[in-house]
Image (cartoon, rainbow, N blue to C red):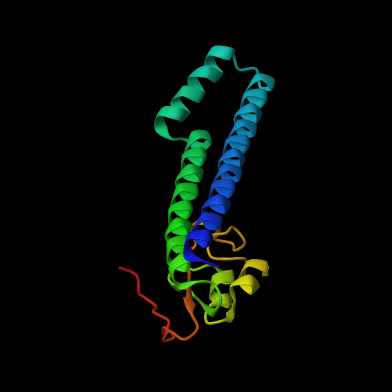
């Protein structure tokens, strides 16, 4: 597949994924806010008290709106990293085998288990974990792993101590 064609395919996939992730974040937040309001009414809170609590949560980045902000932040970060990956793979192609390379600093068990494994592009896409940052690993959008061409030098795990 030509690099321009591949890049266009990646772009379409990313826009669809981003739309799904953002809609999911909004829906989850709406459910949490609705739940909060209903619980507070059930507990006897007034409309004004609930309004004040929601505004305070919004201003302080509390539990309800803080979760939404963090969700949007991780979605944006994951999208930027996937876009970077798309540019790389549109240049090198997806015909080779790729090695999963985990950062191994605060890595999730899924990523540690995948570290060093080799598969085709299609194999990684179809696997239970999918590609890095695709949402299949425990760390989801926060994933810092990369797929490297198999021929590249295998990186030794780098384990850093605490600062």
Image quarter hosting the N terminus: bottom right
Q: Residue 106: tell me if it is visible.
A: no
Residue drawn at point x = 62 percent, y = 34 percent: 32
Q: Give the image location of residue 14, x and y in percent.
A: 54, 52
Q: Nearer the viewer, residue 135 or 66?
A: 135
Who is closer to the viewer here, 136 or 50? 136
| Residue 107 in the figure: left or right of residue 44 | left
Count of numbered labels shown in the rendering: 0
Position of residue 55 relative to residue 128, above or below, is above
Percent position of residue 18, x then y? 54, 46
- Residue under the image location 62 percent in, 65 percent down: 130
Q: Residue 94: x and y, percent?
A: 54, 72
Q: Is residue 129 above or below residue 32?
A: below
The residue shown at (43%, 70%) is 105
Say which residue appears at 46% left-offset and 35% top-offset: 62
Name the spot of residue 16 as percent of width and height, x first. 59, 47
């Amino acid at each position: 597949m030509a690099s321009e064609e591949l890049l266009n395919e990646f772009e379409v996939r990313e826009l669809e994924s981003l739309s799904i992730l953002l809609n999911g974040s909004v829906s989850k937040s709406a459910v949490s806010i609705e739940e909060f309001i209903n619980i507070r009414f059930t507990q006897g809170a007034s409309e004004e008290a609930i309004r004040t609590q929601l505004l305070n949560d919004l201003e302080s980045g509390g539990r309800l709106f803080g979760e939404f902000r963090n969700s949007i932040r991780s979605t944006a970060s994951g999208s930027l990293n996937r876009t970077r990956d798309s540019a790389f793979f549109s240049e090198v192609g997806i015909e080779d085998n790729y090695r999963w390379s985990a950062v191994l600093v605060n890595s999730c068990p899924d990523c540690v288990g995948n570290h060093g494994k080799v598969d085709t592009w299609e194999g990684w896409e179809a696997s239970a974990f999918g590609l890095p940052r695709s949402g299949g690993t425990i760390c989801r959008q926060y994933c810092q792993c990369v797929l490297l061409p198999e021929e590249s030098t295998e990186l030794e795990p780098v384990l850093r101590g605490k600062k």
